Amino acid sequence: MMAVRGAVFRWLSEEVIITQNLKNRLTLQTQQRCGFRKVAKKAEPNKGLAEVGEQHEVVLKKAVDPLPDPPAPQRSSRSFGRLVKPFVFTVGFTGCSFGGAAIWQYESLKSRVQSYFDEVKADWLEKIRPQKQGDLRKQVNQWWNSLSEGQKTVTGIIAANALVFCCWRIPSLQRSMLKYFTSNPASKTLCWPMLLSTFSHYSLFHMAANMYVLWSFSSSIINMMGKEQFMALYLSAGVISTFVSYLSKTATGRLGPSLGASGAIMAVLAAVCTKMPEAKLAIIFLPMYTFTAGIALKAIVALDTTGLILGWRFFDHAAHLGGALFGIWYINYGHELIWKNREPLVKKWHDFRTRGPGTGGSGSI
């Protein structure tokens, strides 16, 4: 009898583990594609479960724990209270991003003269130093110097996304990746995944598509607002778009994980299209068909709005729409409200840097 019980338990455990692995694979094929997965077959009642015993029943329940189904109305109403902390994190992080960008710009301007002399010295040393054939470092420097300021800025973002993509392939990191690099309003960890999921891609095609769009618009957005303001916009848009996704999922009860940089990239695309609506764009696979940036932005917003209303689940349309609307708002109003009013913060930082310990003086701009 004990042998029969053991065989039944092993068979059930193996079936449960296989089912759970399949669910995880399907779930992670999402980006700011949320909840696109095949509906799992409902497990039939296990007649032999009572015979296995309470201890085995607890193990099985933990192993079979499915992805969150649409919650009951009471749970959904209560879950809105869980979004207070993410809301505070969104507001605080956005403020810190733009404040840090203002200080970063101040420090960059301050060190520009010193950098100029350093570059002159480096060029002089390069001329008198014997040249090496096939010097890898020299080739890398030449490639780097050939990039535009925008391309140099987004190279770091692309490298971070590639690193996180590689981490998804390490089995020992899977638990941590699911916890911190996917955003889900049903998760116990709500705040940091709002930022970290912006650099997280599970699909190579998804990451390549997002990074290609970012690379294509990098020069335009950096020329338009500078690298410091761009980084503040990009990071803030990633967090804001995730918070909009939280709101949508909680309101509809369609809880599930999301990941990807699409929300932040939509803000970049929307900002460029709003600032330069007459610019000509084309689809990479159909370069013969061109259209204006203004029309492209309207089409994207309309598509994501339709997807949100009809409940399409192939992409996280709420995150896309949140990022796009934030980019539009920032160009029309946010730049005046936030970036042009950074002078008091910069002056305080200047006074702090100039005064220093033991000097007793105060500087001025």
Image: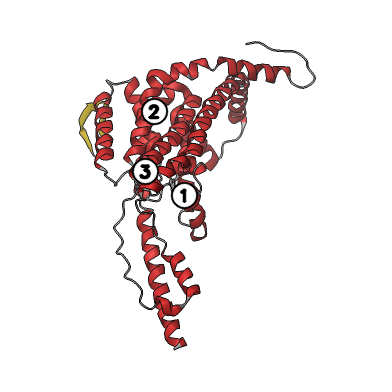
Q: Residues within 10 Å of mark 3 (few under 14, many from 20)?
A: many
Q: Residues within 10 Å of mark 2 (few under 14, many from 20)?
A: many
User: Which of the two discs, 1 and 2, labels the residue nearer the N terminus?
Assistant: 1
Judging depth in this view, the residue of 3 and 319 nearest the camera is 3
Instruction: Give the Cα separation between the discs numbered 1 and 2.
Output: 25 Å
Judging depth in this view, the residue of 62 and 102 nearest the camera is 62
* In the image: residue 283, left or right of residue 31: left
Residue 179: x, y in percent? 49, 51
Is residue 216 visible in the rendered structure shown here? Answer: no
Q: Which one is in front in this view, the residue at disc 1 or the one at disc 2?
A: 1
Judging depth in this view, the residue of 252 and 115 nearest the camera is 252
Dot 1 falls on a residue whose secondary structure is loop
Q: Which mark is residue 249?
A: 3
Dot 2 falls on a residue whose secondary structure is helix
Amino acid on which the number 3 mark rests in the picture:
Lys
Instruction: Give the Cα separation between the discs numbered 2 and 3.
Output: 19 Å
Q: Which one is in front in this view, the residue at disc 2 or the one at disc 3?
A: 3
Q: Which mark is residue 326?
A: 2
Residue 144: x, y in percent? 48, 34
| Residue linked to disc 1 | 187
Amino acid on which the number 2 mark rests in the picture:
Phe
Dot 3 falls on a residue whose secondary structure is helix
